[in-house]
Image: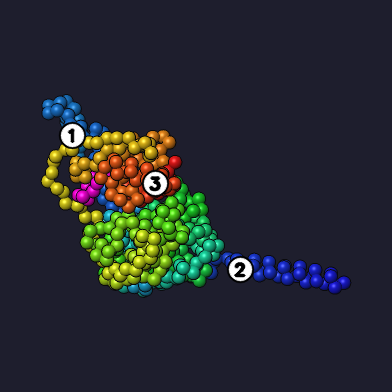
Amino acid sequence: MNKIKKVLTVLFTLAFSIQVNANDAPVSFADLAEKLMPSVVNISTTTTVTTNSNPFPGFQFPPGSPFEDMFKEFGTPQTRKSAALGSGFIIDEKGIVITNNHVIQDAEDIVVRVGGEKEYKAKIIGADPLSDIAVLQIDSKEKFIPVKFGDSDKARIGDWVIAIGNPFGLGGTVTAGIISARNRSIGLSRYEDYIQTDASINSGNSGGPLFDMNGDVIGINTAILGKGGSIGIGFSIPSNSAKKVVSQLIEFGETKRGWLGVRIQVVTEEIADIEKLDEPRGALVASVAEKSPSDKAGIKAGDIILEFNGTKINEMKELPIIVAQTEVGKTVDVKIWRNKKEINKKIKLGRLETSSDFKEEKKENQTEVEKPEISEIKSLKIIARLLNKKDIEQRKLPNQTTGLVITNIGKNSPVNYLNVGDVIVEAQKKKIRSIKDLENIVEKALNSNQKTILIVIYNNQNQRRYIGVKLD
């Protein structure tokens, strides 16, 4: 009898637990949707587009040709109005609206529809293409119903969310789902830390809010994965990433981001092994901009940034976001890995928007063409030639750059993932000034049974990259 009681007790407890968990799911989103709908707006924009109706663009008939008059009218530029649709949400009773930059970009007229009925003209307070966020001001003295930003860091995978927007111009559409993933990077912008959701997001939802169950905005719906319609993979800018951008756009009409002045890349397992780092982490400095904050602080190419302003950098993509959100002019502590040990540096941040990060190197007035030295490097199964002054000028490389231009790559080469035209400038942290330099470094590594070496290249986009090469 006691055994039966124990079994019944266990079953009752289990049934009660299942019932409680089931009750955690909302029975309906109706009350929440009704409360939030007045704060979500539909946005329509118009832009003048100029097109050339000439069926033979770039072609001109000779003077006196019988076709000259016939096609003359086609060569006249034609203008037309192009319309676009999007969504947004009100964050201040005075009519301040948040949306995506791509919704209002190049717009001549912006109309905001509130509550599905009332239409208002709006102007742009500020827009930021790098984060794809824009702030609008409704042209009205009326008071509007705002919503507030929540804490996106508290949002967990599996949490319920609802999206409200203007898909395909239908207006006032509510969809529900869960957070599918966090910290997504999909290659759309410089700063990516997207929330992924399966709540249906379609064309026209851009700029609309993603709400949690408290009715707080935890994301700005920005992108979908798929052609033309939702397949349950949508992406939102986290509210914590958006808040600082929004506040700066409202206050200054522009952003003021921190700037280090470095180009970075992922720390691979091979690079971590070569540098004797305990695991692949941090951000590898590929190059340092001249006279940048990092240059002045003594940061060098090849350093690995492990910690920034007290925050550990686990993945490369985390660093640009943290730096951008740090106050311009602030002096921060940066922990780097150099020569197999930790070093601490202090860096006073510059401002990205006024930086010389993409400043062109000065050209030398030298036109002498050097005779190329071409040779096979058998250990790497490649053919290469010396980098010359003409290469440096055409590719806008730093003036003192030396190295080898790859002209052919063997099928079984250990660097067969590189491309013809890539320039090898360093190997094992030593500059390459001749083909013999590279051959000696590779031969030395092979003789010492070293399985991996570190090389530095400029790729065909002239980006400096560190590569771990596994030797056969």
Can you say which quadrant of the picture contains the N terminus?
A: bottom right
State the separation of the CA atoms marked 1 and 3: 70 Å
Q: Tell me if label 1 and label 3 are in contact, CB under 8 Å.
A: no
Q: Read off the magenta span.
A: 395-404
Q: Position of residue 22 (x, y in %)?
A: 64, 66
Three-letter amino acid code at disc 1? Answer: Lys
Earlier in the chain: of badge 1 and badge 2, it is 2
Q: Position of residue 448 (x, y in %)?
A: 42, 47
Q: Which residue is mark 1?
A: 72
Asked whether residue 128 is in view, the answer is: yes
Q: Is 459 in the magenta?
A: no
In the rendered structure, find residue 127 and report the number of the disc placed on it.
none
State the separation of the CA atoms marked 3 and 2: 61 Å
Side of 50 relative to 413 (left or right):
left
Earlier in the chain: of badge 1 and badge 3, it is 1
Name the residue: 27% across, 38% down.
Answer: 385
Three-letter amino acid code at disc 2? Answer: Asp
Q: Secondary structure at mark 2?
A: loop
